Image: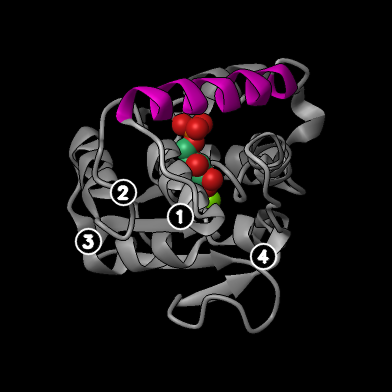
């Protein structure tokens, strides 16, 4: 029963993993190699540049820093074409009801995401109004499992880490919450995220 909630974005509030997958796959194919769903899984919670580094390594392709910047932009432009079509119907099950419940209970609410596109996605899906603080990839460059993104969110909410409950779908995100001294609810299928304090399939399961 903690006074503050910190939400990851991708995979917790919205299902953008498939958009990331489509865009990275298109880029990999252009570079002459394939990109699998299993590889996409490993990029959850990982920043855009670090994701690109991993993909290039998997494909055995070397690029200069300038080329990498261009490739990351290309991927993001494709990703944004998909994000542009997002609406509230792209929220994961129970998200709206759970955020409303948290508000009614007087929780302080923050976003703690690696995505630089987070503000746009909150806007497109109509849930920006629920957040007292937003920390995203524009502000924090240290990727999860580094706890910085969540610690920064706690600071903005003016609460202690021990007051925070984090909601995460990525292994690296769960590790980040624990490293930050926070409790964490995993969002995933049975057997996933063994280090989380609790596990649910989606936020709808927590609506009273
Ligand atoms: C995370 C996603 O939330 O954001 C990652 O899980 C993604 O897959 C990362 O790479 C960065 O996102 P963006 O929107 O800044 O490219
Ligand atoms: Mg996530």
Label placed on residue 85: none
Could you classify mark 3 by the number of other residues whose Cα lies within 10 Å: few (under 14), some (14-19), or many (20 or more)? Answer: many
Q: Could you tell me residue 118's position as x and y percent?
A: 49, 28
Q: From where the camera sits, is residue 110 visible?
A: no
Secondary structure of residue under mark 3: loop
The mark lying in front, picked from 2 and 3, is 2
Give the quarter of the image for residue 36.
bottom right
The mark lying in front, picked from 1 and 3, is 1
Secondary structure of residue under mark 1: helix
Residue where numbered disc 4 is placed? 38
Question: Between 138 and 88, which is closer to the camera in this rendering?
Answer: 138
Q: Could you tell me residue 86's position as x and y percent?
A: 75, 23
Label placed on residue 57: 1
- N-terminal-most mark, 3 or 4: 4
Residue where numbered disc 3 is placed? 180
Which range of residues does the magenta coloring cover? 65-83
- N-terminal-most mark, 1 or 4: 4
Mark 3 to mark 4 CA distance (whole Å): 28 Å
Image position of 145 (left or right of 87): left
Secondary structure of residue under mark 4: helix
The mark lying in front, picked from 4 and 2, is 4
């Amino acid at each position: 029963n903690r006074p503050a909630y910190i939400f990851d974005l991708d995979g917790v509030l919205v299902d953008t993993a498939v958009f990331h997958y489509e865009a990275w796959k298109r880029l990999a194919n252009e570079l002459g190699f394939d990109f699998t769903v299993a590889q996409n899984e490993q990029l959850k919670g990982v920043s855009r540049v670090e994701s690109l580094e991993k993909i290039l390594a998997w494909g055995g392709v070397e690029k200069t820093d300038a080329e990498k910047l261009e490739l990351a932009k290309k991927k993001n432009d494709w990703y944004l074409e998909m994000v542009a079509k997002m609406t509230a119907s792209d929220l994961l099950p129970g998200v709206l009801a759970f955020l409303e419940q948290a508000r009614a209970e007087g929780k302080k609410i923050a976003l703690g995401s690696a995505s630089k596109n987070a503000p746009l996605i909150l806007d497109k899906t109509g849930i920006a109004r629920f957040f007292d603080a937003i920390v995203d990839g524009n502000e924090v460059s240290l990727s999860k499992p580094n706890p910085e993104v969540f610690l920064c969110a706690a600071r903005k909410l003016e609460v202690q880490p021990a007051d925070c409950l984090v909601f995460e779908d990525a292994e690296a995100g769960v590790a980040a919450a624990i490293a930050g001294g926070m409790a964490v609810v995993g969002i995933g299928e049975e057997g996933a995220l063994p280090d989380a304090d609790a596990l649910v399939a989606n936020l709808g399961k927590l609506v009273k």
